[in-house]
Image: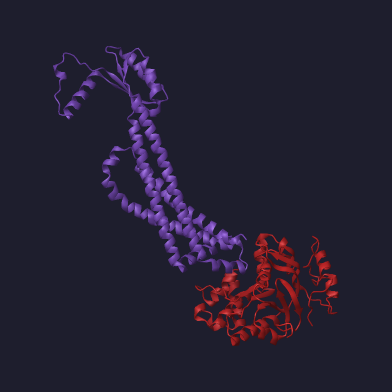
Chain colours: A red, B purple
Amino acid sequence: MLPAGTGASLSTTLTALRSPDARLDSPADTGYPAGLSAANGYGFVDTRRPVLVLNDVTKTYPNGRDALKDVDLVVPEGDFVFLVGASGAGKSTLMKLLIRDELATQGTVILDGDDMARLPRRKVPIVRRKIGIVFQDFKLLPTKTVRENIAFALEVTGTSRRRIRPKVERALALVGLTAQAEQYPKQLSGGEQQRTAIARALVHDPKIVIADEPTGNLDPLISWEILQLLLRINELGVTVLMATHDADIVTALRKRVVALEEGRVIRDEIGGGYHRAG
Amino acid sequence: MLSFLAFSISRAWQGFWRNAAMSLAATATMTLMLLLLSGFWIIQAGFLASLTYVEDKVGVVADLHDNIKDSDRLDLMARLGAMPEVRSVDYVSKDEALQRYRQERAAQGQDDLTSYLPTNPLPASLEVKLRKPEDYRTVAGFLEVEPTVAKVQNIEDTTDRLVSITTFLRTFGVLLLAVIGSIVLFIVINTIRLAVLGRAEEIEVMRLVGASDAFIRWPFVFEGALVGLLGAAISLGVLVGAAEPLSQFMTGFFQILPINVGSISRDVTLLVVGAGTGLGVVGAWVSVRTYLIR
């Protein structure tokens, strides 16, 4: 029931979006520009708000290499998307564009109504709080306990101590680490460390969770555990975008799959496998 | 604002102790560098005092004619005293001159031959002290044309040489201090940069979870200030501890030179605390900035 989001009219509607008076976030708006929701190539009318829109995005690095080339991608709210492709296909660059670590050389990147290219520098942190990021190497701080690592995300964004505590408790409960809250990362298994990282990503109540090969360092059983957790988070209404190499997981879950190759989207299908044939 | 300040300071304190090895290494470097800086500062102060002491010796001595009227002499002294180049004018009478001469002879262990003379052969003189040795020519020229003056003792060449040497030494001292200052600046900033580099991951996480630049920067800036203040406190402790034995060792030196110990200790305290805090803050600011601007 999901749209591929690469309808013929995408470019034209998004061109309209670029005009200064275009608003994506007005309360009455479903978020879809008129043409897009009506003609998404599948014949459905998708009324869901897009959390993420990439239109004709090209990213050229200073060395002249095109890491991304003419990428169109729309991810509606509540979607679960696998991003697959070989190393160097452009997955990391795509992630960097979403968190505005890099800016697109060409085209538009819109996250929850904010055009990254037109976002003032001081607003960048606020947009990043709408994104929960999970990495292959967890990026936990070794000198802090599980609880402190999760609370850290709130502390450094100026949340008051009083409001931090319940949020952290809730995140701990969601990932099932309440009992391990006072342990340090190196006392935990890989799976527990990744769950800590996921709890940290969730503690801001993000619109979208971006996971960059979250199971890359974990054995298959633990990988499934992490996937279960991400699926549960998705069921709670959080959009999930997961870059992965794990063909078994992608093929088994039959979610939307976006495949990148040499910086281009070569496939975008719902219920797809890891490989084209699958 | 207040809670932000409390947050930054408590994070700085935490950061300092949770990375104790790196923080203490930075503090040790800071301390050594501040000691180097203040040591050179003190040497420089003594050096400048020595130069001033030597330059003070330069004066114009004018021998007066015998039997001039007291009123003429007083008039000349008043006019000299009014000149901007002149610091003080002393009158040495014939009797005083003879007495000095005899003392000098006695100090050299030589016979005093003046007692065999019927009259005192030494002239009365005016000893003019100058504000700056460079003004020697002006004052000497003024005195040479005075009718009451018999002769101006000529030390022009010596004065010129002295002035060129002291000018050179002063410039050299300032340059040396500037070089030492730059070395201290670069070493301290690099040390702090290393300490910040060791916590790149922490900064990375802060950026990714959406911490604003201020929330990332200020804890590090306060931590840098903490390193600076701690280094300054240790340096001052060392200096105070060393002051007593050192001043005993150099009593003779201090007695001769016109050194104002009070003002030097004040300057050094300000220098150590100011440089320590300033370097800590600037070092942290510059180091964190690398991670913020992208």
In percent of width and height, residue B221 lies at 52, 59
Q: In this view of the protein, can residue A76 be seen by the observer?
A: no
In percent of width and height, residue A24 lies at 78, 67
Q: What is the total number of numbered labels drawn onto the structure image? A: 0
Q: Quadrant of the N terminus of chain A?
A: bottom right
Q: Is residue A197 left or right of residue A268?
A: left
Seen in the picture, residue B91 relative to B259 is either above or below; the reply is: above
Q: Is residue B114 left or right of residue B288?
A: left
Q: Residue at x 40, y 60 (%)?
A: B28
In percent of width and height, residue B102 lies at 18, 24
Seen in the picture, residue A252 relative to A205 is either above or below; the reply is: below
Q: Is residue B11 left or right of residue A277?
A: left
In percent of width and height, residue B115 lies at 14, 18
Q: In this view of the protein, can residue B207 be seen by the observer?
A: yes
Res. B227 image quadrant: bottom left
Seen in the picture, residue A270 relative to B255 is either above or below; the reply is: below
Q: Quadrant of the C terminus of chain A?
A: bottom right
Res. B160 image quadrant: top left
Q: Residue at x 15, y 26 (%)?
A: B110
Q: Residue at x 44, y 67 (%)?
A: B20
